[in-house]
Each structure stands twice: as structure tokens, then as C-alpha cells.
Image: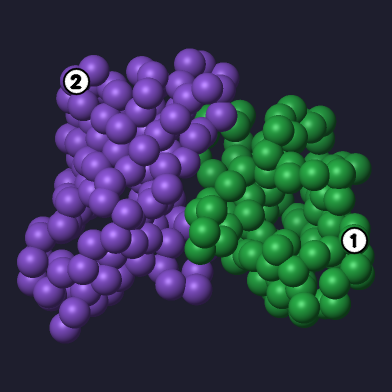
Chain colours: A purple, B green
Amino acid sequence: GQQVMQIPQYQHVQEGEDFTTYCNSSTTLSNIQWYKQRPGGHPVFLIQLVKSGEVKKQKRLTFQFGEAKKNSSLHITATQTTDVGTYFCAGRGTSGSRLTFGEGTQLTVNP
Amino acid sequence: DAGVIQSPRHEVTEMGQEVTLRCKPISGHNSLFWYRQTMMRGLELLIYFNNNVPIDDSGMPEDRFSAKMPNASFSTLKIQPSEPRDSAVYFCASSFGGAGNTIYFGEGSWLTVV
């Protein structure tokens, strides 16, 4: 079955440093979504990427979808303490299949 | 608009007791999911329904777990009998148009089995 892997599992940064998490799928994806879960909270949808090579930005967050549609990344520029949480990618395989979540990357930001 | 509503938010129960978690999906959404989250195993999909019909229950850990969706606005996840290893946060989530679309999570039910 489809597998979605994320690295790193944990990342500790100083406030102001950049952060990147990577997502890799064992199969070609039709789309990929990113979610953020704050400590004690629930996963919240951030964005969806559909096109090969697509790049989307949300303020300090940059999301990329690989040319082969098998990998994706989330990059945060100049992290802030409000960025703390776990970031999940979730990939959808062939049309009609369900989303498969990665294991998540837990980000901590030291002020 | 109201999001996915789960109850109870927190439950502490003794081993062997029956636990019932409840969920009301977002109105109009036709897919409903039950996830379990623990430190050790991360976010696991237990079961999902499409148009009230269970589609994939391969994530249900064992026969002690059962889920129902009697109508489009209500679902339950039942654990009977409960065990300490069932302690976790259980999320209900819903989506519109299919299981591959954006998923909206409830705030979760925090279960502790002692």
C-alpha cells in the first residue's frame, strides 16, 4: 500500500532560524496536503498542492511539490515561537483513494 | 459554521469498562474518519465511512473496537472492554466529496484507561 514518510521526526531550532521538513511517497501522488497541529490541539489544514513542481507561499511558509509528484517540502523562514507544533504531510494516490498521513515533524522553537 | 464536534472531550475510565466516543461531522460532509493518536504510534486511521457506509476498517486494532454511523450527522466509536493501552487521543474528522479531499478534524477525545 501507499506509504508516506516524513523527515526529520523532530527539529529544534532557535527563534529566527529556518526550518524544513520533507515528505516522500512510495507512489506517485495526485495531490499532497499539509497540516499543522499545535501542542494539545488538533491537525488543521494548511494547504494543498496538485501540480508537478508547484510552489505555494503563505507568509513565511513555502510549500513545494516535486516534479515527479512523489515528494514535497515545507520550509519556514525565520521561525517564530508561534510556529511550534507538529507538521504533517498527507498524500492522496490515485483518484478516489484516501489520504495517507506521514508521521509528522515536531518543531520546537527556542526563544 | 460549526466544525466537527466530538464528545466527551476528556474521559478517564477503569480497565474493562465500555467507552463510547461520539462525533457529529460538519453538515454536508459525506466522509467521516476516526483517527487515534499516541506518542508511540503517531496518527493512525482506524476507520472511515463514505455516505454512512464503512469503507476501510483495516486500522481497527481488534474486535474490542467497533464504529457505527447510523446517519449522516452522527457516528460512534466504541471500545469494549477498554484496556490501558487504549489510552490515546481519538480524533473524528470529516471531508466533503471523498476521502482524498481536505480533512477537518474535531478537537479530539482524550481517553485515559486506568
Return the x and y of residue A6 as percentages of the image width and height. Answer: 33, 43
Residue nearer the viewer, A39 or A24: A24
Return the x and y of residue A103 as percentages of the image width and height. Answer: 42, 48
Three-letter amino acid code at disc 1? Answer: Pro
Q: Residue at x 73, y 45 (%)?
A: B61
Q: Secondary structure at mark 2?
A: loop
**In this view, which residue lies farthest toward the bottom?**
A111
Real-space Cα separation, disc 1 to disc 2, in angstroms: 48 Å
Residue A26 against residue B60 in the figure, above or below: above
Pair 1/2: label in front:
1
Three-letter amino acid code at disc 2? Answer: Glu
Q: Residue at x 35, y 28 (%)?
A: A25
Which corner quadrant holds the C terminus of chain B? bottom right
Q: Which mark is residue B81?
A: 1
Q: Which mark is residue A67?
A: 2
Q: Residue at x 59, y 32 (%)?
A: B99
Q: Which mark is residue A45?
A: none
Q: Secondary structure at mark 1?
A: loop
Which corner quadrant holds the N terminus of chain B? bottom right
Left or right placement of residue A111 versus residue B6 in this view: left
**Subunit under mark 2:** A
Residue A70 against residue A13 in the figure, above or below: above
**Subunit under mark 1:** B
How many residues crowd mark 1 within 10 Å: few (<14), some (14–19), many (20+)? some
